[in-house]
Image (tube, grey):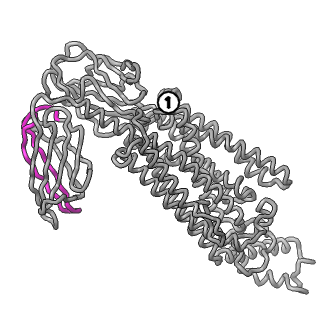
Amino acid sequence: MTATAPRFGPSPVRRPLAAVALLAALTSLLFGLVLAGASPASAHAALTGSDPQDGAVVVTAPEEVTLTFSEQIALDDDSIRVLDPSGERADTGAPRDLTSGGAVRYGVQLHNGLPDGTYTVAWQAVSADSHPVSGAFTFSVGAPSETTVALPSGEAGGGLVGALYGIARYAAYAGFILLAGGSAFVLACWQRGAGARPLQRLVVRGWVTLTAATLAMLFLRNPYTGSGKLADAFDLDGLQSVLDTKPGAALVSRLLLLGASALFIAVLFGAYAKREDEKEKRDLTFGLATGGAVIAAGIAGTWALAEHASTGIQPGIAMPVDVLHLLAVAAWLGGLTALLVALYRTPDVPSAAVRRFSRVAFSSVVVLAATGLYQSWRQVGSWSALTGTRYGQLLLVKVALVGVLIGVAWISRRWTARLTERSGSADDADDGDDADPAVSRPPGSADPAPPAGPSVPESEGAEAVASVASVEAADAPGSAGADEGVAPERAAQLSRQRAALTATKEKRARDADPDRSGLRRSVMVETGIAVVLLVVTTILTATEPGRTEEEAARGSSTAAAAPVTGGQVNLSLPFDTGGQSGKGTVRLDISPGGTGSNSVHLWIDGPDERPMDVPEVKLAFTLESKDIGPLPVVPDRLTEGHWSASGVQIPMAGDWKVSVTVRTSDIDQTTIDKNVKIG
């Protein structure tokens, strides 16, 4: 299969290329991370500061609220809203762009004479990499107060519309990989496969999937970045506004390129498949390869134009690198799928075609390693972001999957070597197709029969087996049923039966061939891993890069205002869920322990005072005297027995009830409460 490892053989010159490629990719990745500098964040806009700051208490009402972001964002009149304690708008309307120098700042004017109390600032916009972002925080004038405004619990781009948009994104990537990779497999590895119906269906289905997914994303774009209501997908004004944005223009460009690719497919599986003259076919191959490469690069560029590569550091380098990365993925995984289909659904895949794809796949792995190195440095940039952010952790999963995929490909290459050794030098005659014996021919079998026409389905093969007696009787010397003197209708029927019988025998021989079966199984495993890899890659494109996440965390920590009063809160709460290993102690630190933004650290110790892991821990804060809460907090696990949560908002000072829910098994959990003075 893929050329990620050498075939087993007597030659000492060959090296385990799979291991070398994987080692080079991992070494390059880690080396790049070590050398990464503290450059600006590279995608997914993050709020890095505000004035007033999150949780601040100011003496008099400010004239304006300003927000500072890590990159440019797209705003409309309602993107930044300031709400008073009763939930009414306290701002005057459209945000102003206050960007100057390297600081990306936006401001919104407030009404004059605002009364004292707690105000909520909610914002929602579209970052330069096309993903919707949102958030909220509070500040107080004079002193904190009760507020009827509930901070939004969901993220922008969520709900049903977000789920549908995500499905369309997965489908778009899958469709492109099948379209580009399947076509490349035919042109570069097995030109005679242009006449194979299974490969034709694979490529056409890739085109249909990509086209349908692109249309769905175009219509869902407005509600995805705005209201979140599915009905707004058919709002013509909203669709017009989408067309005026960079992501909208990219989707329209993709549709136009898909129109050109439809013509490419028609020629590839029409005139090209029927061409017999060798010179004409070579010329047409060059033209199709050139045109197909331009179309594929253009379609890949529609992703680079509108997503991570188009913003942040070095976009002029990042965009062509992103295009190369996506083309390499398509050539490898799409070609792998096409090979799997050919092995299972076509009778005469030559071993030379498998060897050619091995070379294509190895080249793709080299390109993926180089481009992946650059992208990893650009999106992660540090060891802490690699291990401490969701993007970095997903990247590690992706690298591991690539390693497993290369390992399985090495096994596939071993089966390919065995098939090649059997097929002999005839595989290299002409263009590798005409003289190639089918890889399904078992050792020691007779020469393959001449082509018996198009492939025959298995149901027709059963018919042929049932009528084998009549066919043999008709073919017997001196038989009255011989073709000569037989009615034309009967002769045609006998010819079809012979073709079906021949196809059935060939299929049985292929299925009984252990080398071909081994190759099919290993390629099937490769394809399954490739599907998981595609899912992880698609999730990565929608995940906030590690650089940005770390910068946002630094911004939120520096922007947190000191509380009016109060100090760090430390609690120690014993618990017993009643189940096995259900006893322990919760230690809780709330810092700085005042109004506004707080960080919470929670440790769980077992009876032996050693760290204890549990399946779930939840917190809630309730100010019963003011009928506020419960305010839920779900901390993140850091290490064994240690959880934390940042940005926990305490809107006002008072005697707060802190509730800790600990679950030690599927059915054993308990909630422990304690009242503490905060603020």
Front position in the image: 660 or 496: 660
Which residue, given by chain and number where applicable, does mark 1 sit on?
242
> Residue drawn at (40%, 25%), measured in percent from left and top?
75
Give amino acid for label 1.
Val
In the rendered image, residue 487, in percent from the top left (x then y), is placed at 89, 74
- Residue 72 in the image: above or below residue 636: above
Disc 1 crowd, CA 10 A, few/some/many (<14, 14-19, 20+): many
Quadrant containing the N terminus is: bottom right
| Majority secondary structure of magenta residues | strand
Outermost residue to the right: 485
- Residue 320 in the image: above or below residue 515: above
Tell me, yes or no, whether the highlighted magenta stretch contains residue 674: yes
Q: Which residues are magenta?
A: 650-679
Front position in the image: 239 or 419: 419
Front position in the image: 144 or 557: 557
> Residue drawn at (70%, 54%), measured in percent from left and top?
188
Classify mark 1: helix, strand or loop. helix
In the rendered image, residue 443, in percent from the top left (x then y), is placed at 71, 79
